[in-house]
């Protein structure tokens, strides 16, 4: 049998990518619980989300350590180098998404066990959560397939989430004069904001897909220059 | 051909039989402060890398074996160019063509042009001895002359030039300083060159090459026989010398190419696959064969 050069290294690299991208599944699981906790204003479930974030943090540390070891022992270059650099970013985004779930989970008890919830606002938050969940799954698939078009489509999906976030704001404005309801609505706006940030993190993962494939890093959308059109990455001369 | 004596490259007049000249000799003014300098001379400080080596459609053969197949590339002054590629890809042969070492091998020949600025080094009227003074070379295994002292090793190339004794001394000291060896050997210049460590011997060979003030320095696997510390010293030296002399380094060590070279060329099966800024070659090469080689998928 002919042995492929750097056989063990290639296996390590492949395993590293798998462990990192599986971190997105951990986020999806955490987000699912988070959305459910929001939907039912379930404080106990929210506490589980907080506790289980250690799993995501642990994955972050594990992948980070593996990346350091590969840098130290294998001197990765070219596509391998870009992949490993991208996985470092992806893993950081995963860790941030997990933290946003924790942020949401910590907001739920503030409103208490029988909060004056507004059905429309809750429904909007659940829709946002599900759309963000779909973004995360698509980001994972785009990375695994090195599919830049699929990655760039995340921008379109994220616009949907952004619009839902704005709708939440409108719904909160219309919540009425009751002080308790207003306080609850303000808290839920923070929830909406956290979900919206998770969507942004998913887009960031998509940008890393484009980096791995093209070698060029460009934000899909530049928040500070929204009028500038997206520039198609070109291979440098 | 617009030959100027100060170019240091002697075009031999078929009627002329005298030894060709090198810079800083006879027709050129002597170094600014040679005799006034008590320590290492200042000659190397005045060297500036200004000359470009341009290889045009180079083919090289060993008998019927076609080792280099139409390579075009340039070694730019002020830049270190690394040439990487698997064994047998023709990289050493290519650089050996530059100072016309290749033609010394029985049955070996080459075609194409190798230009130092606008002078074709392979032209029939260019003297090969002069070419090798202008284009110095350092080899994989340190090869000091075994019977000579440290001093005589470095002076060996100068003695044939008719340089005055004091000038030779200044140039030797300057070359040892330039090769980063002066502080280690200044108090034992008469010891045998072979008494030095491997890394010091290689720097001695670099000093020997520098003593004749070449315009180009070719290094063929200069650190392959050295330990990591000696390797890093040579690499640091390469960085210090690149403003003084145009440098090309053949290396199997891709991390070395990454550390020392501004430009990296990748050769495969006698052909130049890709040449570009080193950073790009190791982060995002254009050619899939470069990608596969640098990531270790073959080679």
Image (cartoon, rainbow, N blue to C red):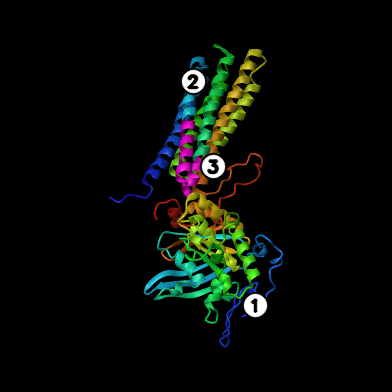
Same subunit under labels 3 and 1? no
Which of B32 and B222 lies nearest the eye of the viewer? B32
Q: Are marks 3 and 2 in contact (CB under 8 Å)?
A: no
Dot 3: within a 10 Å radius of its alpha carbon, few (fewer than 14), some, or many (20 or more) residues? many
Percent position (x, y) of residue B95?
49, 67
Q: Are marks 3 and 1 in contact (CB under 8 Å)?
A: no
Q: Is residue B285 visible?
A: no
Chain letter for mark 1: B
Name the residue: 49% across, 26% down.
A31
Percent position (x, y) of residue A234?
55, 53
Residue under label 3: A207
Picture quarter with the C terminus of chain B: bottom left
Percent position (x, y) of residue A221?
60, 42
Magenta span covers which residues? Answer: A59-86
- Determine the CA span between mark 1 and mark 2: 81 Å
- Determine the CA span between mark 3 and mark 2: 30 Å
Of the two numbered discs 3 and 1 in the rendering, the one whose residue sits closer to the viewer: 1
- Is A75 within the magenta? yes
Chain letter for mark 2: A
Of the numbered discs 3 and 2, the one sitting upstream in the chain is: 2
Percent position (x, y) of residue B260?
55, 55
- Is A189 within the magenta? no
- Determine the CA span between mark 3 and mark 1: 59 Å
Picture quarter with the N terminus of chain B: bottom right
Kindly state the secondary structure of the residue where label 1 is placed.
Answer: helix
Q: Is residue B149 above or below residue A102?
A: below
Residue under label 1: B5
Name the residue: 56% across, 55% down.
A236
Residue under label 2: A51
Of the two numbered discs 1 and 2 in the rendering, the one whose residue sits closer to the viewer: 1
């Amino acid at each position: 049998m002919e042995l492929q050069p750097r056989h063990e290294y290639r296996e390590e690299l492949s395993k590293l990518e798998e462990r990192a991208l599986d971190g997105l599944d951990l986020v999806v699981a955490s987000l699912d619980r988070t959305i459910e906790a929001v939907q039912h204003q379930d404080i106990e479930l929210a506490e589980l989300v907080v506790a289980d974030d250690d799993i995501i943090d642990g994955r972050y540390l594990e992948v980070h350590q593996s990346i350091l070891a590969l840098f130290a022992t294998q001197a990765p270059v070219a596509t391998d180098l870009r992949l490993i650099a991208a996985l470092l970013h992806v893993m950081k985004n995963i860790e941030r998404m997990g933290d946003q779930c924790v942020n949401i989970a910590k907001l739920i008890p503030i409103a208490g066990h029988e909060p004056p919830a507004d059905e429309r606002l809750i429904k909007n938050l659940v829709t946002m959560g599900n759309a963000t969940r779909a973004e995360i799954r698509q980001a994972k698939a785009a990375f695994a397939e090195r599919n830049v078009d699929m990655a760039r489509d995340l921008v379109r999906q994220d616009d949907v989430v952004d619009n839902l976030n704005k709708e939440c704001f409108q719904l909160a404005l219309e919540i009425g004069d009751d002080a308790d309801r207003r306080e609850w609505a303000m808290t839920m706006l923070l929830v909406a904001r956290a979900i919206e940030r998770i969507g942004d993190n998913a887009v960031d993962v998509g940008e890393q897909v484009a980096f791995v494939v093209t070698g060029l890093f460009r934000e899909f959308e530049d928040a500070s220059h929204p009028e500038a059109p997206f520039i198609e990455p070109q291979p440098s001369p | 051909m617009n030959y100027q004596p100060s170019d240091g490259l002697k075009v031999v007049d078929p009627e002329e039989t005298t030894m060709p000249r090198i810079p800083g000799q006879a027709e050129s003014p002597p170094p600014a402060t040679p005799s006034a300098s008590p320590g290492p001379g200042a000659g190397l400080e005045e060297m500036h890398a200004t000359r470009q080596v341009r290889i045009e459609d180079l083919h090289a053969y060993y008998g019927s074996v076609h080792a280099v197949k139409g390579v075009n590339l340039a070694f730019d002054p002020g830049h270190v160019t690394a040439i990487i590629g698997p064994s047998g890809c023709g990289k050493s042969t290519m650089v050996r063509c530059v100072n016309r070492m290749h033609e010394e091998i029985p049955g070996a020949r080459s075609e194409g042009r190798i230009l130092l600025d606008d002078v074709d080094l392979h032209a029939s009227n260019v003297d090969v001895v002069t070419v090798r003074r202008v284009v110095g070379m350092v080899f994989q295994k340190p090869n000091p002359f075994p019977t000579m002292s440290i001093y005589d090793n470095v002076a060996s190339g100068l003695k044939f030039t008719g340089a005055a004794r004091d000038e030779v001394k200044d140039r030797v000291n300057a070359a040892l300083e330039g090769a980063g060896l002066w502080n280690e050997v200044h108090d034992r210049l008469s010891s045998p060159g072979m008494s030095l460590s491997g890394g010091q011997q290689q720097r001695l060979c670099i000093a020997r090459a520098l003593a004749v003030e070449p315009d180009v320095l070719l290094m063929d696997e200069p650190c392959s026989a050295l330990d990591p510390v000696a390797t890093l010293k040579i690499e640091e030296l390469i960085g210090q010398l690149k403003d003084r002399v145009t440098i090309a380094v053949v290396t199997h060590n891709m991390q070395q190419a990454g550390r020392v070279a501004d430009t990296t060329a990748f050769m495969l099966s006698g052909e130049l696959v890709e040449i570009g800024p080193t950073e790009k070659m190791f982060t995002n090469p254009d050619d899939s064969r470069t990608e596969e080689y640098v990531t270790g998928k073959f080679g």
